[in-house]
Amino acid sequence: MPRALSRIAVDITPLRASRDLRLLVLGNVVSGLGTQAALVALPYQIYLETGSAFLTGLLGAVELVPLIAMALLGAPSPTATTVGGCCCSTRWRWWRPLPPSLR
């Protein structure tokens, strides 16, 4: 049984070896919990204060707009090409140096 478990278990050796990685992962978990708490608390507070399901839904729609906008603007374009060691997008006109392993 331990052999089968070792095949599917997550290797946490890097977390044990690196204090900085542990702090990074912990910070990411705390940030994620805070984000989820805010996503639940704000609509709940709006509903408690107004009693309106419409305003609660409107808040959800307003929260969705920046999420979609940032996903479209921040994501790499499908027309991105590699030119001279840089990732150049013909759609958004941005340049980013590529890591040496991808050059």
Image: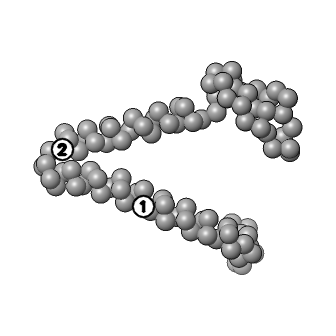
Instruction: Give percent across and percent down for residue 57.
Output: 25, 41
Colouring chosen for the image of the structure: one colour
Q: How many marks?
A: 2
Provide the residue designation for mark 2: 53
Q: Quadrant of residue 26?
A: bottom right
What amino acid does circle 2 point to? Ala
Q: Secondary structure at mark 2?
A: helix
* Mark 1: few/some/many CA within 10 Å (<14, 14-19, 20+): few
**Eyeballing the image, is 12 above or below 34?**
below
**Eyeballing the image, is 53 above or below 42?**
above
Q: Quadrant of residue 34?
A: bottom left
Q: Secondary structure at mark 1?
A: helix
Instruction: Give percent across and percent down for residue 99.
Output: 81, 44
Considering every residue shown, the one lying at the far top of the view is 90
* Mark 2: few/some/many CA within 10 Å (<14, 14-19, 20+): few
Q: On the picture, is 14 further left or further right than 47?
A: right
Instruction: Give percent across and percent down for residue 37.
Output: 37, 60
Q: Is residue 24 in sight in this rendering?
A: yes
Provide the residue designation for mark 1: 34
Location of the C terminus by quadrant is top right
